Image (cartoon, grey):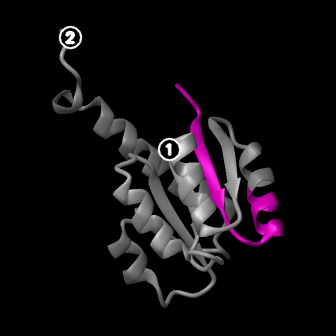
Amino acid sequence: MEAIRILIADDANIIRHTLCKLLERETGIEVVGEAATGLEAVDKAAELRPDVVLMDADMPDLDGIEATRRIRALGLPSKIIVLTVIGSRLFEALSAGASEYLFKDCTRAGLVAKIRQVAAEIRCTAARPDNAQSAQ
């Protein structure tokens, strides 16, 4: 099975670095890119086509909610997990197209489980017969 490809978008260097280190230890997960702003997250998502984007809700230039909306508008199959320290933007994030919403104080096991869950949804959808290309 192919590794789950992750893009990490957070304006805090220490958060991005820590998430990278945590996820590098996990079998079947590969961090393919990082972004420090919402605009960079949209550009990198379009370029790298990750399976999952870990998106900070509040970033400079373009917040994570609007970046989520723009990634959805690109039609990418990427699942987006919005990460935040406060829960006041839950409805807004989900309305923008986020698959999940997690607090930054979640456990490593909780984060990895959520990544695997949303990535499995992509693979299930892609494997359905109604999504298969004809063999012509």
Query: Which residue corresponds to mark 1?
Result: 51
Q: Quadrant of the C terminus?
A: top left
Examine the structure image and report whether residue 46 is included in the region drawn in magenta.
Answer: no
Cβ atoms at labels 2 and 1 below 8 Å apart: no
Q: Position of residue 49 (x, y in %)?
A: 51, 42
Q: Alpha carbon of mark 2 to alpha carbon of mark 1: how far?
A: 25 Å
State the extent of the magenta-drawn residues as a range: 1-19
Does residue 77 lie above or below 104 as drawn? above
Query: Which residue corresponds to mark 2?
Result: 135
Q: Residue at x 35, y 58 (%)?
A: 73
Is residue 48 visible in the rendered image? The answer is yes
Does residue 87 lie above or below 103 as drawn? below
Examine the structure image and report whether residue 17 is included in the region drawn in magenta.
Answer: yes
Q: Residue at x 64, y 40 (%)?
A: 29
Q: Residue at x 83, y 68 (%)?
A: 14
Who comes first in sequence, dot 2 or dot 1? Answer: 1
Residue type at mark 1 is: Asp
Judge left or right: residue 97 versus residue 66. left
Residue type at mark 2 is: Ala
Residue 125 versus residue 60: which sits nearer the camera?
Answer: 60
- Residue extending farthest to the top is 136
Q: Residue at x 63, y 71 (%)?
A: 106
Q: Position of residue 111 (x, y in %)?
A: 60, 60
Is residue 109 visible in the rendered image? The answer is no
